[in-house]
Each structure stands twice: as C-alpha cells, then as structure tokens.
Amino acid sequence: MSNISRYISAPAILSALALSACSDDQPVLTHRDLDGTDTFFASAEAQSQNIYYKPYVGYVGDPMPFFDPVDKNFKVLYLQDYRPNQAVTYHPIWAVETSDAASYTSLGEIVPTGTASELDAAIGTGSTIYHEGTYYTFYTAHSPNPATTAGINEAVMLATSTDFRTWTKDRSVLIDGGDTYSRTDFRDPFVYRADDGSFHMLVSTRLGGKGVLAEYTSTDLRDWTSAGVFMTMMWDRFYECPDLFRMGDWWYLVYSEQHDAIRRVQYFKGRTIDELRACTANDAGLWPDSHEGFLDSRGFYAGKTASDGTDRYIWGWCATRAGSSTVNAADWAGNLVAHKLMQRADGTLYTTEVPAIASMLGQARTIAGFSLSGNESRLMPRLGTENRIEFTVTASSAHDRFGMSFARGSDSEKYYSIIVNPENGDTRKINLEEEGGIGFIPDTDGYTFATPADGVYHITIVTDNSVITVYINDAAAFTTRIYGTLKNCWSINSYGADINISDITLQSK
C-alpha cells in the first residue's frame, strides 16, 4: 500500500470521541463525532438521492427522456425497479421532471404494467413524443408466457395522455416482428419526426439472427408501415435503447451495446442519414473516434438524450452492486446519472458535468496544493453526502500514473482507487481498483483518451452517496460506484510518479 501523508491530524482520537450506544451495545459515531477525525466511518446511504436521482423505494432503470414543449422542461420516464419485483408483472414506467438535469421532482407511476396474461405484463424501454395536444409514449411489451399471447414475446405498444398525468393504453396500436423480424427481440422503440414531415420509429430486433434496427413510418402516430432495415448492427452485437438526433451539421445514433464484453453507451455519426447508416453496412465499423464512440465507462448504461433546443443532455443509470459491495457484480438498474453532451468541430461527441450541479452545493472551499513523488498519497478532508471536487494534476512525464481514492481513512487496509493509467505514451485509460484487495475490479473500466501534450489534467469529480463521476480535460468521463464514499476521507495518489496538484476546491453538502 501507498505511504500516507495525512491532511487531517487525529491525535488521541479514541479519547476524543463521544460514543452513543445502539440496542446491541456497539458504539456508533455521531455526525459531530466525525469532526477532526480521519479514521474510516461505516456510513449508511440515504434512502433517496438528489444529484443522481433514485426513488425513495426501488431504483431507476432505462431512462426515456424528452423535452416537454408544454411545460418547457425535461421529463425523464424510466422503468421502476422495485427490488424485489413481482415475478411476472414488473417494471412499470415512472417519471421525474427537471429543468436543469440536476434536481428532480417525482411524477410517480404513469404507465402501469398489464396483467399476468397480457402482452405487457412486463414493460421495457420506449420513447415519448408530443403532437397536437397529446403525449404519445411507445414502449416495449414483454410477455413472460408467449403461449398466451399468440406466440409473441415482445412487441411495441402505445399509451397516450393529454396532460402527462392520466394515461390510457391504446391496445389497437401494436407492432410486432411478424414473419420478418424476431418475436423474441423486438423492442426499445424510438420515435422522432423526420425532415419529410412523417414520424419514424426505430426498433431493436433481429433479422435472420443478425441484429438490426427496423424502421417504420407513420403520418398519425397510430398506423405504421414497415420501411425495412434502417441500420444493421456490427458482427454479433445488439444495440439497445437507440436514440437518433441531429446536432449541428451531424446526425447521431446513440445506443447501448448489450454484449458482455462491451456493455457501454456508444454512438455513430454521419453528415447525412445515409452516411450514418453506412457506418455499420456490411460490418464496416466506421467508428466516430479513436475509442469506438464510448461516452462513459461501464458504470453508465442505457443512455438516451434530450434537448431543449439549446443544450442536450444524456441520461443513463449507474448500477448498484450485489450486496452493496464495490467489488461485486453489477445489478440491473440503479441511480439516474446525467451528463451534458458536447460536440467538437469535427463532429465527435464528449460528455461534461451538468452545469447546475455546482450551484446546488454552495460555496467552494479552497485547499492548498502540494506535490507527490514515488508511491505517495495525501489524505484529504472528510466528504459530505454530496460533493463536487476540482483540482489540476501536472505530470512530469507521459508515463506518470496517478489516481484518487475514496471510502478511505487513516486506518484503512483496503480502499478504492480511480486510477489514471498510461496505456502507452499517447493514451490514458481510467480504471477502478481495490487497493489492499483484488486490485483491478472487473467490468468497471473506462476508455482510452489522448495523453495531454502539456501533462496537465483538469479534473472534476461529482459524488452523491456511492455514485461517482470523474471528468478529465473534456476528454473522458468515468462513472462508477464506490460504497462508503460519503462521510469518509479521500486521497490523491502517485504511483511511482512525480506530480503536482493545484487549484483544489471542494463543495460539500
């Protein structure tokens, strides 16, 4: 383990602590007792969360955002994951609303599941569009027993509302794979209005065993005609949660790759729809950038976007982990995480912090800078429940390895580190490691980004309970989950490196 240079001194900690007793007579630290200490504190997460939203009961699955032109705000529909869910009827659609992608108001359930014998006994991802006084939400109907639903396992169904509060299912609108596409994978409808004035729907499905996005068109959002295959999927991949939009001079398809080896949110780009479609034709693999269009780490999934005409945001979920252990396998669903989606001059995309988060956390506290060399760490002040950290790292070489640890105290034998690793002299990659334990934590890695020529890394970190997002140089975003982050210390570390840390600020709540 690294040598620790303490930022906080803790003389005679045990004698200074005021202890209170639980029913089992075990001493527990109170919030006041933490002041002036730097030992690890076994903190409990809040039942509901603010920056990275979760409902008071359950978790967020597959967000379906859109901009509401009536209320002039974003509505984010999502699949409600109760834990435990009912065995057959599960994942009703709930919703929140937000004006800034940083603070949310719950709207509760808007589309319930069907009964156990109906096609939409379980519900999957969809999309919402507003037209002539009516909201149309298209969603995936999933039958756990196709024998009772005419052999259909998945299909597209519709619910409508005139006020976004009371919804009616229109069971006359039903689109399934028929004799052409898969009846098992026919899901995640995305509806948009194209330049031709018609409505277009993309559906994730399979044709002859290969993943495709099927296309349908309509003039009234009720009667749909097949327009064939919009886009094939690369190799044996399957694109979930498709999202098509134009931003400036470019068209984009954002999707989530289901394959276990990838399991991340990606995108393709083209100056025209046809150029976009050509990115995967005959497995061409015309990736938009040097890292296959990844927009975040494996800790961010099912990302879809919405724009108010000025700013575009992307919402996905950060999975909880089995047994509330950082090293365990990811669950399905978690917290709602948002990024601002940005575009470079060459059309490539990247994600940044949502601007409104900084204003939620109050006055920034300035911390003096320092240098680290060799295998050295500096323990930093105890965090709150919600935090925003900024600092700059200046590395002496392109091969310097450094990182940030969380859920750490002066007495910690194990802790969790987000490490900026040199892949080679030209690229970097962010990984999550358990120091003093298993080392690299599987299925948490990020993606490569260019090593800055000047060796300067501007880093912003946002934490809300156990959810953490790191942004570096408008070049990389890394979302992950580290249990025990709140109320504990964190550190900045060098690993055989010479680095200088400056411009450190902390906002905490």
Image (cartoon, rainbow, N blue to C red):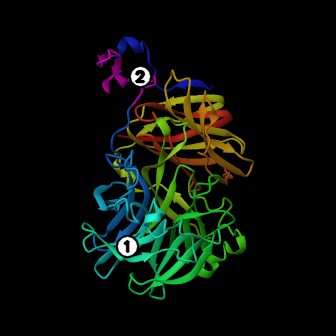
Q: Which mark is residue 37?
A: 2
Other-residue count near label 1 (Cα within 10 Å), few / some / many at <14 / 14–19 / ≥20: many
Type of amino acid under label 2: Thr
Which one is in front, 180 or 134?
180
- Seen at 54% across and 38% down, the residue is 328
- Tell me if residue 330 is in the magenta stretch: no
Task: Indicate the secondary structure of the residue bearing disc 1.
Answer: strand
Q: Main secondary structure of the magenta part?
A: loop
Q: Residue at x 53, y 78 (%)?
A: 215
Tell me if 183 is positioned left or right of 346 in this view. left
Q: On the rendered structure, is 187 left or right of 73?
A: right
Identity, as a three-letter code, of the amino acid under mark 1? Leu
> Does the rendering let one see residue 311?
no
Q: Left or right of 302: which side holds 373?
A: right
For the question of whether residue 81 can be seen, the reply is: yes
Residue at the disc numbered 1: 158
On screen, residue 243 above or below 89: below
Q: Nearer the viewer, residue 339 or 501?
A: 339
